[in-house]
Image: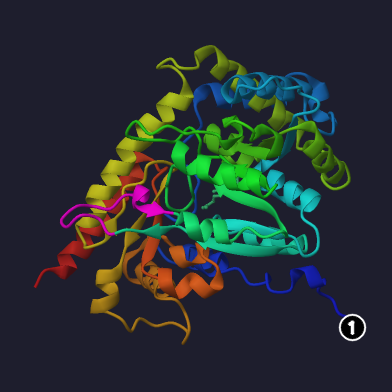
Amino acid sequence: MAKRLQARRLDGIDHNPWVEIVRLAKEYDVVNLGQGFPDFSPPDFAVQAFQQATSGDFMLNQYTMAFGYPPLTKILASFFGKLLGQEMDPLKNVLVTVGAYGALFTAFQALVDEGDEVIIIEPAFDCYEPMTMMAGGHPVFVSLRPSPAPKGQLGSSNDWQLDPIELASKFTPRTKILVLNTPNNPLGKVFSKMELELIAGLCQQHDVLCISDEVYQWLVYDGHQHVSIASLPGMWDRTLTIGSAGKSFSATGWKVGWVMGPDNIMKHLRTVHQNSIFHCPTQAQAAVAQCFEREQQHFGQPSSYFLQLPQAMHLNRDHMIRSLQSVGLEPLIPQGSYFLIADISDFKSRMPNLPGAADEPYDRCFAKWMIKNKGLVAIPVSIFFSRPHQKDFDHYIRFCFVKDEATLQAMDERLCRWKGELQP
Ligand code: IK2
């Protein structure tokens, strides 16, 4: 065919480094601690809700409202309205999407114009950059930077901070949106109220919108608090808050997400959604509606899944932190999410010449080496950075700890074998 096949909006985003890691993970006998999904069952009430949605009311097999199955938009408006301190209209302030991914895509398509600048705080979930570019926007990166942990102590995701002067310097008259992700993937950093106030102040000063990706909002540890930036004074009017049922109820395959915000912004997202996806599967939405109704009754009590899941993941986190250290990996303690990153600088100096392409960041070579030689899958952290910054952050790998006890035991066995190989 003589005509150019690839649409120009795909230029520069047609290579995805995840693909190779996922392929290798399938090829080798591995314990997969890479991709962020639970390998245990969702809670019983969620499984039952889904079964009921597929075997009960036959009308759940049919189309529903474009912007969300009404019982779901209603419960989301009431549940999150209380948390955000905002009266929400289910028809105007909530849109149900195909996962949080769908919410992000709809938001970028609805709001980003050719040449608009989008500030992305990195390390960042790796779809923000291509989504900005597909919409014709220009990503502008600002890095969280680590300060060294006190000698002999493990670092924490809280050691990674924004430089306020550098952040302020990224705002220009072309800046349309700042993307925030708290708790952050891959670091597990939970932005403090003070950090959010700094970001909120700059957004207001420069008339910039905020897309706040809060899919891990329930997963916070050690007494840290998740704060939604939309709940800060003056921010509701300029913030879109995004959530995920997959992450909330350990059912990532359901692919139900949502975005909430003021009607004058949401109406543009509804236009995109109406003309692209139309709506997310009705049965999955019905199941999520039931899950939220259940959570609303149990909220704040020990029976709430939003308390039980972080309690269980806290134990997994600490288990993984102890285990990884046995072979010289240096984990950073995450305040939230179900990921942690481990520093591999020591390996980088001891075995600098792992196989890989000439300009391949070290962490990618290391992740591939670890799959092939140690049977453990983790994700190179450089893929969460923009290309110019990848070489500066090529000495970390990300592990996912939302895993079953048996998986963590299998991890321990692999690490034990690895440790044995280290002995003289
Ligand atoms: N936002 C963030 C920050 C996410 O991490 C995800 C899920 N991706 O995680 C996979 C991984 O990093 O291994 C999403 C949005 C998308 O959520 P959903 O599954 O609801 O579309």
Let me know if residue 330 appears in the view. yes
Q: Residues within 10 Å of mark 1 (few under 14, many from 20)?
A: few
Q: Position of residue 389 (x, y in %)?
A: 49, 71
- Residue at coordinates 91% horizontally, 85% vertically from top-left? 2
Q: Residue under circle 1?
A: 1
Which residue is nearer to you in this view: 238 or 5? 238
- Residue at coordinates 19% horizontally, 52% vertically from top-left? 153
Quarter that holds the N terminus: bottom right
Magenta span main SS:
loop
Residue farthest top in this picture: 297
Which residue is nearer to you in this view: 156 or 55? 156
Q: Position of residue 372 (x, y in %)?
A: 38, 71
Q: Position of residue 394 (x, y in %)?
A: 41, 71
Asked which quadrant contains residue 254, the reply is top right
Q: Position of residue 25 (x, y in %)?
A: 46, 63
Beta carbon of the mark 1 residue lies under 8 A of ligand 1 = no
Say what secondary structure mark 1 lies in.
loop
Which residue is nearer to you in this view: 236 or 128? 236
Where is 346 relative to 318, above or below?
below
- Residue at coordinates 83% horizontally, 23% vertically from top-left? 59
Q: Which residues are magenta?
A: 148-161
Where is 123 relative to 106, above or below?
below
Where is 372 relative to 89, above or below?
below
Q: As drawn, is 412 to the left or to the right of 136?
A: left
Let me know if residue 123 appears in the view. no
The amino acid marked with disc number 1 is Met
Residue 261 on the magenta span: no
